[in-house]
Image: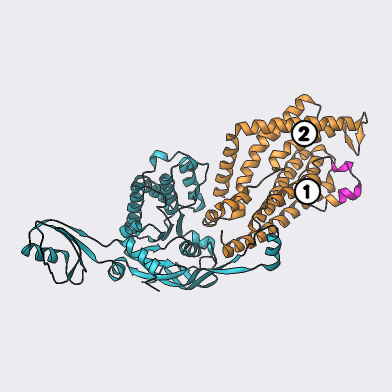
Amino acid sequence: MQDIISVKELNKHFKIYKHHRGIMGPLRNLATRESTLVKAVDGINFVIQPGELVGYLGPNGAGKSTTLKMLTGLLVPTSGEIRVNNHIPWKSRTEYVAEIGAVFGQRSTLWWDLPVIESLDLLQHIYKIPEDRFQQNLGEFRELLELDPFLNTPVRALSLGQRMRADICAALLHDPKLLFLDEPTIGLDVVAKERIRRFIEHINQARGITVLLTTHDLSDVEKLCKRVMIIDHGKLLYDGKLDLLRERFGEKRQLIVDFVEEYEIISIEGAVIADREGSRITFHFSGQDITASELINKLSAQYRIRDLEVREPDIETTIRRIYEERLLE
Amino acid sequence: MRLFWELSKLAFQRQLTYRAATLAGLATNFFFGMLRASVLIALYHGQSEIAGMTITDAITFTGLTQAAIAFLSLFSWYEVMDSVYTGAVSSDMLKPMNYFNFWLAQDSGRAFASFLLRGLSIMIAYALLFDITVPQSADQWLAFILVLLLSWLVSFSWRFLVNLAAFWTPNALGIARLAFILSWFLSGFFMPLRFFPVWFVRLCYLTPFPYTINAVVEVYLGLVDGQALAAIILAQIAWILLLVLAGMIALRAGVRRLEILGG
């Protein structure tokens, strides 16, 4: 299949001028114009196939939004190549943006003082969406995103979660092939996050829309994306399956067992005793050596168990370790 | 075209909802109109005519100029600038539409609402209080309406251009204020340009500004016709083309800058 997004050796550098302090500061600023080069995006390569749902992950300031702005045509790369849906985004912007949907979580694309429905009506004319298609999409999204309670409320009066739902609806009315989401769940509560995730999953699966979403919320990625790209300091650190990342860098899986009595020696092949606290023992094991059920079977065959708990390695810890220890560089 | 109409309609409706602001604006415009009329009456000092304008013409002049304030958004219009500073411009760039037309459509709705609410009502109030001049023939009315429409386009394309300064500097408000002061001084808003020395009038007519106010008032008062009228219309069209072109070029450069430096 042909790539829907292809990015080659993408760079975006910004010059940040140094500001001097003090009364003479502005003068010195003029005289010297010292600048530092910030490499917001530094030599990134990736391709995305039609229908994929990819998470673009990184801490604040990693270069996520800069990449997304280049992909949507808002920023021109310093160097490198971007092709999205057979367009160079910034070159043929007007035609290009008609084929994509984009939601920048921090900023609404809707009109501040208009009721939601009027904003959506206006979008119908901006994108020249045929009436029947528009009504069909609007009907579906109204139900799935539960827009009805605030359809006649001005955008400025919406809650963050409502606004995000309205914005996502707005980005999809014209049947885009691609959807770019920048921090779609930022600042939302658990219920609101979940509702938006379910919707993103739905339109990806039911409509085959390719979705690229940036986030620094790992639960978004964990629940939605099979594939994840990790960026930090402008460099792509990882691009692949989430599961593999977990296996490669994850903590070991943990089995915590409460035995009926205290045993002196417990040794099971493939598992290591990490902690011992009276009759409670914590084993570390890796999925490659032994499965949880094998381990439990072996233990329960030899010892009397009162209670047990399997703890999966936490993706958040894994990613934090990747950033902090720079494991992928 | 449909989009233009929808945007215009929305801006029109939006303008209608600001009832308190409209009333306050109307009161201010009317008050200053009275003040300026009194000053001119004092200036005439019993003379029946100055520079081809009767005292009735002069009073009508103050009414017309006060009526034009809201219609042409003479003193302030920072909407494009605001959208650059708030970042709304990025959202607009993500929509498949012409940015200039997007604002033109909205300004047409705003201007038309202002024309009805704040323009016509001031002229009606003037007609009730004073003896005012009205165009004498259908031709003159037609010419006036055409020149008025064109004056809005001159004014809009100038305001749009000025607002684009926001793409280059984080504080373009000063530039815009200066531009607005310049435009109402040179447009003949203060005083009919006829009252000034010829060299100054010539200087003014080298700029687009008299084509927003002075020329329009003169057509209304019937002070120009025939060739002079045709010259005004042609000059208006030329200025519109020039300013729109300049606006397009500046917009392109501004957007390019935004694309390179980031929002």
Instruction: State the SS at label 2.
Output: helix
Q: Please tell me which residue lies in front, A128 or B85.
A: B85
Spot occupied by residue A172 in the image (x, y as percentages of width and height): 42, 53
Residue interval drawn in magenta: B187-202
Quarter occupied by residue B97: bottom right
Spot occupied by residue A157 in the image (x, y as percentages of width and height): 47, 40
Spot occupied by residue A108 in the image (x, y as percentages of width and height): 49, 50
Q: Nearer the viewer, mark 1 or mark 2?
A: 1
Residue B69 lies, with reference to residue B84, above or below; the image says above
Instruction: State the SS at label 1.
Output: helix
Gap between marks 1 and 2, in whole Å? 21 Å
Who's the residue at 70% across and 59% down the image? Answer: B246
The residue labelled by disc 1 is: B182
User: In cyan, which chain?
Assistant: A
Residue furthest to the right: B47
Who's the residue at 71% across and 50% down the image? Answer: B174
Q: Which of marks 1 and 2 is nearer the N terminus?
A: 2
Three-letter amino acid code at the position of disc 1: Leu
Residue B211 lies, with reference to residue A229, above or below; the image says above
Report the side of A206 relative to B252 (left or right): left
Three-letter amino acid code at the position of disc 2: Gly
The residue labelled by disc 2 is: B63
Callout 1: residue from which chain? Answer: B
Q: Classify 10 Å Cα crowding around label 2: few (below 14), some (14-19), many (20 and above).
A: many
Spot occupied by residue A45 in the image (x, y as percentages of width and height): 44, 73
Discs 1, 2: same chain: yes
Who's the residue at 31% across and 57% down the image? Answer: A223
